[in-house]
Amino acid sequence: MDRIVILTGAGVSAESGLGTFRDKDGLWTRYDLSEVATPEGYARNPRLVLDFYNARRANALDASPNAAHRALARLQEGFAGEVLLVTQNIDNLHERGGSREVVHMHGEITRALCASCGHRWDAPREMAPSDLCPSCTAPATRPDIVWFGEMPYHMERILPALSEADLFVAIGTSGEVYPAAGFVEISEEAGAETLEINLDPAPAPGRFDRMIAGKATEAVPAWVAELLGS
């Protein structure tokens, strides 16, 4: 086995104190998605949107990486082949846990984007509608994250990697949101083995060759130890 592609979701960061989204008490159940997670909502009320993400940014920055994050960094370091770590999460806990390279398909809460010219830069802890883009000076600052109705980032890198993978692993993700929900089928069509590591099985059982149930902080380190033989 030479190539591994790993997709992580909210379940990896949940034990660091960051809320998941799809469960009955999840973050999205308490907010109107059209108001805080769409370009149209931002255009209507940028203050509401920026305040929402300011709170999320503070939560992410104050959180600490957990054993699952550190185990995946250990896998990247110790595996003899290639390990591409793709995350749906917008926090930076993978990086702070030691991962040397992370592909953020939904963007990063610690980065800012100009809605006018497309310039990107490191976000301050708090963003305001009056913040000016450092490139074009327009007051059009938004978080550099993918909202509903927008195309995920880095698909030109992710899709070829899936088609060449020997093993695809989905960790802590519901598997309900496309295009990520289709990654397992792409991998299987290319001949890869597929593994799900999750607190509970995905809504559509049998999609993966193998399933490991349990908390990410326990299941992921155990799986990494098994794979590395130590």
Image (spheres, grey):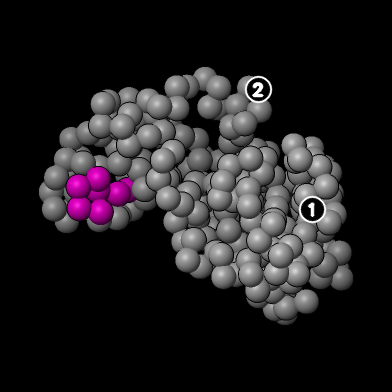
Q: Secondary structure at mark 1?
A: loop
Magenta residue check for 14: no
- Which of the pair 216/61 is nearer the observer? 216
The answer to whether residue 230 of the structure is visible from this angle is yes
* Numbered circles on residues, count: 2
Comparing marks 1 and 2, which lies closer to the viewer? Answer: 1
Q: Residues within 10 Å of mark 2 (few under 14, many from 20)?
A: few
For image coordinates 86% across by 64% down, the residue present is: 226
For image coordinates 67% across by 40% down, the residue present is: 174
Answer with the quarter of the image where residue 48 lies. Answer: top left
Q: Position of residue 182 (x, y in %)?
A: 63, 52
In the image: residue 29, left or right of residue 172: left
Q: Which residue is mark 1?
A: 208
For image coordinates 79% across by 53% down, the residue present is: 208
Where's the C terminus, which quadrant?
bottom right
For image coordinates 51% across by 68% down, the residue present is: 157
Please tell me whether residue 51 is drawn above or below residue 144 in the rendered image: above
Please tell me whether residue 223 is drawn above or below residue 127 in the rendered image: below
Residue 24's tag is: 2
Where's the N terminus, which quadrant?
bottom right
The reply to whether dot 1 and dot 2 touch (C-beta < 8 Å) is: no
Please tell me whether residue 36 is drawn above or below residue 98 in the rendered image: above
Q: Position of residue 219 (x, y in %)?
A: 81, 49
Q: Amino acid at mark 2?
A: Lys
- Looking at the image, is mark 1 or mark 2 earlier in the sequence? 2
- Provide the residue span drawn in magenta: 112-118
